[in-house]
Amino acid sequence: MITWNLLHARISCAHATLLLFLHFFLLVKAIVPENPEYSSCDMGYLNSVLSSSSQVHAAEDSPVSGGGLSQNGKFSYGYASSPGKRSSMEDFYETRIDGVDGEIVGLFGVFDGHGGARAAEYVKQNLFSNLIRHPKFISDTKSAIADAYNHTDTEFLKSENNQNRDAGSTASTAILVGDRLLVANVGDSRAVICRGGNAIAVSRDHKPDQTDERQRIEDAGGFVMWAGTWRVGGVLAVSRAFGDRLLKQYVVADPEIQEEKVDSSLEFLILASDGLWDVVSNEEAVAMTKPIEDAEEAAKRLMQEAYQRGSSDNITCVVVRFLMNQGASSRSNSG
């Protein structure tokens, strides 16, 4: 026969177990949102017990696209973006033409969020504004880009102090200033150019298993482990990003920057989230884009191809065409 004291002890134990379970659930939901960048822990049972209302639903139910032409006629651009097969939309993009100190400047970016859309949306809204306000934007563009990335990251983290979730975002950006193309990135949203007919990656995907990235993380006191793929702290599949407050000591927003000369051999640039690059190679993307002169149509073609190939992520593509080459190409063909 169960005594009252024994029954009371069992009830207390069950209550403590339930509280521990709830604490674990909330912790995991906070740092492992439903996103491929995060560890693919099996959340099915937990979600059947407690439902989460924090999922960000797609802002658009169908793909969006658009494009434009620079005032000086030197480049055109197009973009296409879709939630793809996912119910939430965490990709953002920016295509902007501005005037700075008498220069026509093109600013293009793809921002792939994880842990919610807040970080990607914040970076879209603030990064380029912070950049063009930098006093050395024209005179020392590389240092201005690095400063703008880190300043934007710092300001976003300040804005997240009262948030329960820990959002982050990749960034792949391209800045056109005169005859210079400067590409900067954190994370795995990639930039690829076509120069002389060849596909050339002008950014590096930041992954935790890369020798230098792993060393940097471990030197900062972190660790990299396998959890379906290599992850920082067993959680995050990219080693650099905006946000990610809980991992900020290891997951930095320091961009790698590459400069290219805009000349007659430079045909076009592709910026895209990993929703494209997971299923389409650099060479395939360039081959698909080459015959399509309209930049918006080229971006749509890439997006549609990624979807048809079974991409499971949001898909966002930006294409920038350098128009000085169209004249050179037509002259060579007529000759």
Image (tube, grey):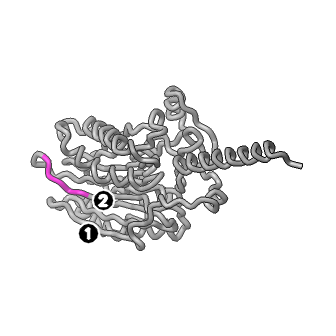
Instruction: Answer left or right for 329 relative to 13.
Output: left
Residues under numbered marks 1 and 2 in contact, where contact means CB atoms less than 8 Å apart: no
Between 312 and 12, the one lying in front of the other is 12
Q: Is residue 143 left or right of residue 305?
A: left
Mark toward the viewer: 1 or 2: 2
Q: Earlier in the sequence, mark 1 or mark 2?
A: 2
Q: Is residue 194 visible?
A: no
Position of residue 259 measured from the top left corner of the image (x, y, whole percent)? 31, 42
Residue lying at 34% horizontally and 58% vertically, measured from the top left = 93
Residue occupying the point 45% across, 37% down:
248
- Outermost residue on the front side: it is 4
Q: Say above or below: 300 vs 31.
A: below
Residue placed under numbered mark 1 in the picture: 334
Measured as percent of width and height from the top left, residue 206 is found at: 47, 42
Determine the residue located farthest toward the right in the rendered image: 1
Quickly name the residue at label 2: 320
Seen as rendered, the residue at the extreme left is: 102
Q: Position of residue 245 (x, y in %)?
A: 44, 40
Nearer to me, 47 or 311: 47
State how many labels appear. 2
Write the residue at 37% across / 58% down: 92
Please give the range of residues in magenta: 96-100
